[in-house]
Amino acid sequence: MANSNALFERRRRRNRARLSKVGGGRPRLSVHRTNKQIYVQVIDDTAGKTLAAASTLDKDLRDKLKSGSNKDAAAEVGKLIAERAVKAGVTTVAFDRGAYKYHGRVKALADAAREGGLSF
């Protein structure tokens, strides 16, 4: 039986494979979630560059947030990444949730990014 890290990696790769088929060359909005923080990047895979990034550890958000591990914090990060991505000239992305379910903090981040001007 595989350990939990191997299963997590398998889910992440499976999602990324689907994303590469459907993504159509769009930049990827990649989410990483830990028990205490949430991180997000807009990545151009063809050039191999990060176009924009945000997390609950950003100085703008750190003072404003009570905790980095709730839906409110994820929504703030979603707004911030949308603002930074639009500033970098990106409006359409492919949402890469990694191995995480589209639920809770990941969903809150995605909804806030959509409200901020990103479409996916």
Image (cartoon, rainbow, N blue to C red):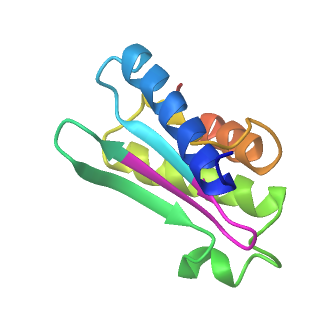
- The stretch of residues the image draws in magenta is 32-42
Q: Is residue 117 visible?
A: no
Magenta stretch: residue 14 in it? Answer: no
In the picture as drawn, the residue positioned furthest to the front comes out as: 1
Q: Is residue 108 visible?
A: yes
Q: For the N terminus, give its image quadrant.
A: top right
Q: Quadrant of residue 111?
A: top right
Q: Position of residue 63 (x, y in %)?
A: 70, 85
Please give left or right for residue 88 compared with residue 96 in the image: left
Identify the residue at horizontal 74%, vertical 72% (top origin): 68
Identify the residue at horizontal 33%, vertical 17% (top origin): 24
Identify the residue at horizontal 43%, vertical 54% (top origin): 84
Q: Decide which of 57, 48 is in the foreground and name it.
A: 48
Q: Decide which of 21, 57 is in the foreground and name it.
A: 21
On screen, residue 107 above or below 71: above
Identify the residue at horizontal 56%, vertical 50% (top origin): 31
Please give left or right for residue 2 compared with residue 29 in the image: right
Magenta stretch: residue 37 in it? Answer: yes
